[in-house]
Amino acid sequence: MSNLVAYFSASGVTRKEAEKLADKLGADLYEIKPQNPYTEDDLKWWVEGNRSVAETLDKDFRPAIVNDDAHIEKYDTIYLGFPIWCYVAPRIINTFLEKYDFSNKKIILFATSGGSRWGDTVKELKVSVDPSCIIETSTVNGR
């Protein structure tokens, strides 16, 4: 079995880091795509009523994803990348984790951030998958 680098990137920052990691590891690359793509305005967290912030604050929200062909069964280790939004992962990461069976898999998290740290990220992802699967690694400055 091999490694998979799965990632969600709304602005392209996390995509670049995921591509570098996949190249370094010789891993397959998989993009988690939202059914309703995020616009530049959706990412302006400082604007009242902003989509990304509203979704982040709703712990039960699960944005739909358009692809369901990650073939998780082929991999032992999944490197899962995403931006940090308000000290948590975007809820689309919960959608991804709940969509597949990660039994006997290792999920290694990596994140990009313009300044936020992990905060409650790991805790809020563990509700969507067997907590023993998740390993927190590091953040990359996304500025």
Image (tube, rainbow, N blue to C red):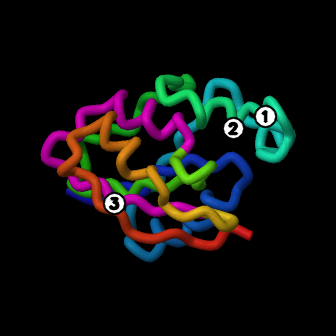
Name the residue at 36% across, 28% down. Answer: 99
- Disc 3/disc 2 C-alpha distance (Å): 25 Å
**In this picture, residue 36 sits left or right of residue 132:** right
Residue tagged 2: 53
Tag 2–tag 1 contact (CB < 8 Å):
yes
Q: Which mark is residue 50?
A: 1
User: Residue furthest toward the left?
Assistant: 104
Looking at the rendering, which quadrant does residue 83 occupy? bottom right
- Do the numbered discs 1 and 3 sit on residues whose CB atoms are within 8 Å? no
- Considering only vertical position in the picture, is 20 above or below 7? below
- The answer to whether residue 130 shows anywhere in this view is yes
Residue 110 on the magenta segment: yes
Callout 3 secondary element: strand
Q: Residue at x 49, y 30 (%)?
A: 59
| Relative to 9, 28 lies left or right | left
| Residue hosting label 3 | 108
Q: Quadrant of residue 1?
A: bottom left
> At which x and y percent is residue 131?
23, 46
Q: Tell me where residue 118 appears, x and y as whole percent.
A: 48, 60
